Amino acid sequence: MSAATVAADRDQPIRIQANSATLDDRSNTAVYTGNVIITQGSMRLTGNRVTLNTDAEGAVSKIVSQGTPATYKQTPEGGSPVDSRGQTIEYLADADRVVLIDDAFLEQDGNTFQGEYISYDITREVVDAGRANSNGGTGGEQDRIEILIQPRKRSEPATP
């Protein structure tokens, strides 16, 4: 995903659909509940309960979506879409990062990542999976991740 795509999405208006909303201007927080759908450019975030935080200037700094599961999708210009889900999704707008927590799953180009924790750096296209806490987890079977990487297509042989 190119940095230009992320920037172009960030410059688009945010559209929010929900069954109810509670806005708290003093704490720069809004809570949306009931089949929440948030779109901004090619980015789409869904959940049952979504908390949106803004900075002092009103720019979105963080969105936390909770669902069964919550989902995050974004399609870069001319690239393959990112499709992900988790019980909790943290979209860190300031850092251009998405964190998937509990039953986390991310797919792009047929490559998949599954685990309890996945962090995705949108701009750099870097996935970090399997580090749910600062001490590296308990090391048990539940902390394992699964990754599926598709083979690259070989180019046609050169003709003499």
Image (cartoon, grey):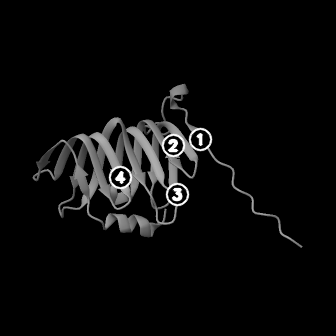
Residue highlighted by disc 4: 44
In the picture, the disc for residue 147 is: 1
Q: Secondary structure at mark 2?
A: strand
Give the alpha-carbon distance from disc 4 to disc 3, as whole Å: 15 Å
Residue 100, relative to residue 39: is it above or below? above
The quarter of the picture where the C terminus appears is bottom right
Q: Find the distance from the CA under tag 3 to the CA under tag 2.
A: 20 Å
Q: Earlier in the sequence, mark 2 or mark 1?
A: 2
Q: Amino acid at mark 3?
A: Ser
Residue type at the position of mark 4: Arg
Residue drawn at 31 percent across, 38 percent down: 66
Asked if disc 2 and disc 1 are in contact, CB closer than 8 Å, the reply is: yes
| Pointer 4 with pointer 3, Cβ within 8 A | no
Query: Mark 4 or mark 1: which comes first in sequence?
Result: 4
| N-term mark: 1 or 3 | 3
The answer to whether residue 102 is above or below residue 155 is above
